[in-house]
Structure formats: structure tokens, C-alpha cells
Amino acid sequence: QVQLVESGGDSVQAGGSLTLSCDASEYISCMAWFRQAPGNLREGVARIISGGQPVYDYRVKGRFTILRDNNKRVLLQMNDLKPEDTGTYYCAAKKRGICGFQTDYEHWGQGTEVTVSS
């Protein structure tokens, strides 16, 4: 049974930076970050797979960086934050299937809240 635990969410002013962490109970090659703003559907933010390049949603490309801190930890470094980045951020992991932005990931964390004020 895989467990994912997110941390690092906070309130920050526009233009600021935050780094989110996702600690997994085991190594999984496909890991991703999703977010959900109030009243909106959950959307993919960034994903990373071993042996491949990170992939970002167009809304965060150039500002966010996803990287592996170690075999069981994935970070989401967020720079130049904007109010539209506000939402609950979820870590997700997949052992099988396409490593994409579909929401049918096998494992999910509980979420960590990010609030960006103007």
C-alpha cells in the first residue's frame, strides 16, 4: 500500500516562491502534482517519470520546476506565484498506465493548500 504525504503549502504574496514536498512510502517512477481551485476541477500541474523529461501545464511552464529530491521524495518548486495559482495541491503517483495528466492515478496525497494574494 502506497502512501503520499504533501507538505509546504502556505500563503504568499504574488511574485513570491514556495516549494512543495511529496514524500512517498516507496519509489514510484511516475509522479505528478495536481491542483484544484475552489469550484474548479482538479487539473494537472507538473509530472515527472524516471528516464524522461518533466512535463508542465502551460499555465505554470517556466515558473514551476518538478524534481526528485531522492528516490521517495518529489518537490514542486514554484516561483513568480500568481493569484491564479491558488488552490489545493495534490501529489499523485502511478505504477502502471500512462504517466499523464489524467486523474486516474492509483495513489493520492491528502493535499496542501497554497494561497497567493495580489
Image (cartoon, helix red, strand yellow):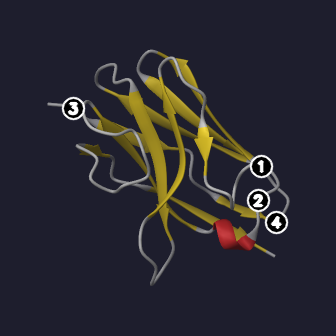
Q: CA distance from mark 4 to mark 3?
A: 34 Å
Front position among marks 1 and 3: 1
Q: Are marks 1 and 2 in contact (CB under 8 Å)?
A: yes
Amino acid at dot 1: Arg
Q: Tell me how far mark 1 sits from mark 3, CA to CA.
A: 29 Å
Kindly state the secondary structure of the residue where label 2 is placed: loop
Q: Mark 1 highlights which residue?
A: 63
Which numbered tag is attached to residue 14?
A: 4
Q: CA distance from mark 1 to mark 2?
A: 8 Å
Q: Amino acid at mark 2?
A: Leu
**Quadrant, the C terminus:** bottom right
- Please give the residue where the numbered disc 2 appears in the rendered image: 81
Where is residue 111 drawn, in percent x and y? Answer: 40, 55
Taking the image as shown, residue 66 lies to the left or right of residue 71, namely right
Q: Which mark identifies residue 1?
A: none
In which quadrant is the N terminus drawn? top left
Judge whether 116 appears above or below 48 on screen. below
Looking at the rendered image, the disc whose residue lies closer to the viewer, 1 or 4, is 1
Which residue occupies 34% across, 19% down?
Answer: 27
Q: Earlier in the sequence, mark 1 or mark 3?
A: 3
The residue at 62%/69% (across/down) is 86
Q: What residue sits 47% from the left and 25% below the top? A: 73
Kind of residue at badge 4: Ala
Q: Is residue 92 above or below residue 89?
A: above
Q: Residue tagged by mark 3? A: 2
